[in-house]
Amino acid sequence: MKKFLRGGMAALMFLATVSCSSDDDNDSAPDNNPGTITAKINGQPWTGEVSSVTLIRVEAEGAQRFDISAEDDDIRLLLAATGTYTESGAMTLGTYTFPQGALFVPSYKVNGNYFGEHMPEEGTMIITAVNPGTRKISGTFSFVADKAGTLQNQVTTPEVLTVTEGQFTNLTYTVTDL
């Protein structure tokens, strides 16, 4: 499980730059409503456009990881939770915390590129509802990330990034088996 979470940061950074295809075997009609994701970032309301929601399953390791990528014009949030592999194609309802079971990667958009200057210190994702039949998932999240360095000089980023009242509702996810 630890090996799977360690690979999470690299995978999330990869997701930030590439969209991937899915080995989705769901035969139901696609849902054109991607769901919503909102939060407060340092006290300011934030609404993200969801770009990717994927459940990555690795049966051989008995593990799976749920990833969300969402962004607005200034900030991208990459969120992940790891758990035990399930046959159902769904994450287990419950609480996932950083650093053991969750990962949070914020980045700022500058001239069309994203710069991740903050590293998470603490955080929680709670998965409150999953429907593997419709591939919908909902939950809440919050985290604190400290500035680890400066990678660009065009946007001043805060020393501490605090994300509160995070909520994702009825996100449509795909399942990828590795």
Image (spheres, rainbow, N blue to C red):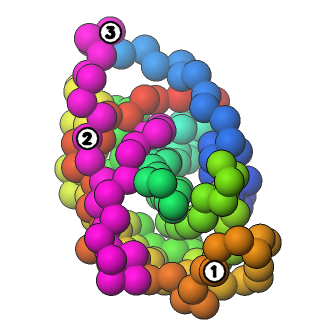
Note whether 49 is above or below 94 in the view shown: above
Would you name the residue on which mark 2 appears? 35
Mark with earlier residue (3, 1): 3
Residue 103, x across and y down, in percent? 55, 65
Residue 146 visible in the current orientation? no
Callout 1 secondary element:
loop
Look at the image and give the residue range highlighted in magenta: 27-55
Front one among 162 and 79? 162
Q: Quadrant of the N terminus?
A: bottom right
**Residue at mark 1 to residue at mark 2: CA–CA distance:** 31 Å
Mark 3 residue element: loop
Residue 26, given in percent of the width and then of the height, sits at: 36, 16
Residue underneath mark 3:
27
Residue 51 appears in the rendering: yes
Q: Amino acid at mark 3?
A: Asp
- Up the image or down, 11 lies above or below 132; here it is below
